[in-house]
Image (cartoon, rainbow, N blue to C red):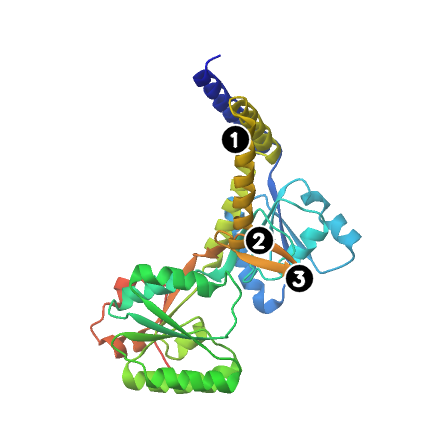
Amino acid sequence: MSCVSKIAYTLLSLYALCLGATSALASDKEVTCIITPKIESSYKYVFDEMIGGTNSQLPHLRRIEINGGSKESIQSTLAKCRNTTSIVLGKKAWGYAHKAGLNNLVVGAVKSTQNSIAKPKALLSYQIDPALFLTTLKKFTPTITQIHIIDTPSVPQGDKRAALLSQATNLNLNITVHAASGYKERAKAYQQVVKGLNPKREALWIWDKGKKFTPVFKWILEESWKRNIVLLSNNLGHVKRGALFTLYPDNHAYGVSLAKAALDILKAPTEEALDQATNTNTNTNNKNKSKDDIEVENKVEVAEEGVKSVEGTKGAVGVEEGVKIKVDVEYMRQTKLAVNKIALKHIFGPDYPIRRLDPDLILPYSN
């Protein structure tokens, strides 16, 4: 058999193995479980909206709510999910699924992957993609070139700050992160930034929230309205009070994305089939290579894997009991836009075409 024929035969074998594995999966396995912790009434609507999205794609989904218990009781409760792909909402449910020995997991409703307990098949973060805030700001006012953020001094590798800084240059934006820890230090940092800010080309992006921050935000709001400063915030409550805009989760669309991620796993070839196909391809190719060539390639592969494990691709590193677990993260892009109409008209004038922005929520008041 010629070299070309061998390669063609190997490729056909690989395709057949993958296709067979895919068909087997699609026929005898389904995404059947969505696992949640016991949900407080104040957050119930959020989970209901997410599950409504998943059910629109997976109508036969079985919802299982767990409120702790022994390892044995959790395993018993989740026994029906063991041989299927499951969707898990929240870190608690993720922990329960891990205790029950479930492997094919799509994890959602998790903002941070720090202290991750296991590596799922897919993780869709509940942290809104910070790049979306930048592109939205540019829709409002392309003249802004500088954004100021007050944040804690130490931010874990792979956090939203890294994602944010990597995207800013594509939009001709400079981002300055002012490090400040503690209430007094952060209040002072906000005062210094706001007083020195040029409203025509600079904006302030607020990441802080909570009752303790309320007096500081009130002062920021007063100063920004006096000088027509653009305020964007991660907090919908700030927009209700007078910040220009925020992005907030579209929970139903997010649930749809979780379901699609689960279906993608369902359709993927099994690891066993891929390993078998890879081994077949490797053995065929190695027949035409010298021992020295194979040894060099193996060393390169080991080195590359070492680099990947340190750098990651698009994710964060979770740490538990001193063991690092790399978790690939997809930031949330299923969002809605909330705009304060009075702030918009105040900053840009009464003739600003708000409908051009196509906001999902227009807040007509400020207090």
* Residue at the image point whose x is 47% and y is 76% from the top: 208
Of mark 1 and mark 3, the one earlier in the sequence is: 3
Give the number of the mark in front: 1 or 3: 1
Question: What residue did someone put label 1 on?
Answer: 293
Instruction: Tell me: residue 348, above or below residue 261.
Output: below
Question: What residue did someone put label 3 on?
Answer: 38
Of mark 2 and mark 3, the one earlier in the sequence is: 3
Question: What residue did someone put label 2 on?
Answer: 326
Type of the residue with mark 2: Lys
Q: Tag 3's secondary structure?
A: loop
Count of labels in the image: 3
> Local crowd at mark 2 within 10 Å, few (<14), some, or many (≥20)?
many
**Disc 2 to disc 3, C-alpha distance:** 28 Å
In the rendered image, the residue lying farthest to the front is 292
**Disc 1 to disc 3, C-alpha distance:** 56 Å
Displayed quadrant of residue 207 = bottom left
In the rendered image, the residue lying farthest to the top is 1
Type of the residue with mark 3: Lys
**Disc 1 to disc 2, C-alpha distance:** 31 Å
* Residue at the image point whose x is 22% and y is 76% from the top: 349
Instruction: Tell me: residue 59, above or below residue 14.
Output: below
* Residue at the image point whose x is 49% and y is 22% from the top: 12
Give the number of the mark in front: 1 or 2: 1
**Residue 34 circle label:** none
Of 65 and 136, which appears nearest the observer? 136
Instruction: Locate residue 115 relative to residue 190 in the image: left or right.
Output: right
Kindly tell me whether residue 23 is visible in this rendering: no
Query: Where's residue 34, x and y in %?
Result: 61, 50
Instruction: Locate residue 54 relative to residue 240 in the image: left or right.
Output: right
